Image: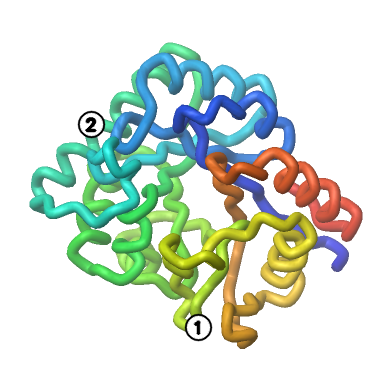
Amino acid sequence: MNHLVIDINADLGEGIGNEADLMPYLSSCNIACGGHAGDDTSMHDAVKLAKTHKVKIGAHPSFPDRENFGRIKMDISCAALFTSLKHQITDLLSVLYKENATLHHIKPHGALYNLAAKDEKVANVIIEVVKSMHRPVQLYVPYKSVIAQLAKENGIAITYEAFADRNYNDDLSLVSRKEKNAVIHDADTLVNHVLNFVAFKKVKTINNTEIPILAETVCVHGDNPEAIELVKQLHKRLLENNIKVQ
């Protein structure tokens, strides 16, 4: 496993309050910017921590649905979604300007992320938002997704993401959170999941099928109750396996 590199990211600023404990083990973070969670104070706090730990900063926009934490598909027009996403990212950009920090990437949240992986209309809205920013910014996207293909066609830099603490179906979609086996809570299971991504470019699905996958960044959800211990163990075990975290 020599010369392998992976980025570890987490979704932060979502009201959990564990940012300071997670940040030392991350190389990038996704900051909630008002859609599903987050406000000016939480964004400032997360950005300051990211700067201190030299962690790359991303925007984590969502369907504007705080009530459901952005995890339910929302019936919203493309125009309204564009306006909301642009507003959310602009709010974080304002914080970044005040903190003299830079936006590295954008990663949609929850239902928006999952929908953009397969729905061309929703994916196009996100692509148009990124294009409207007129600045170099990466898009964190799932492997073999609709949004990944559209981003490449539009000249937008992408980073393939896989989820360290989530189980996969055979079509590379995430197991629904309605299912009891959707989220991984055991550190050994999670580490083996990620080592499989990084070293062998495969994921073992819930059907015990090995499916090809590319992962340049892996996510541990900040709202996972075991998030701190999981990301700590992941960081440690990756280094033990000669995999650089950056």
Name the colour scheme: rainbow
Depth check: 117 or 191 in front? Answer: 191
Q: Are marks 1 and 2 in contact (CB under 8 Å)?
A: no
Quadrant in which residue 215 is drawn: bottom right
**Residue at position x 66%, y 20% in the image:** 52
**Residue at position x 51%, y 34% in the image:** 12
The residues tagged by marks 1 and 2 sit, at their Cα atoms, a distance apart of: 36 Å
**Residue at position x 56%, y 67% in the image:** 181
The residue at the far front in this view is 180
Query: Circle 2 sits in a helix, a strand or a loop, which is it?
Result: helix
Q: Quadrant of the C terminus?
A: top right
Residue under label 1: 170
Q: Looking at the image, how many numbered discs can be counted on the residues?
A: 2
**Residue at position x 22%, y 60% in the image:** 122
Q: Earlier in the sequence, mark 1 or mark 2?
A: 2
Residue under label 2: 87
Report whether residue 246 is seen.
no
Q: In this view, does 85 lie to the left or right of 5?
A: left
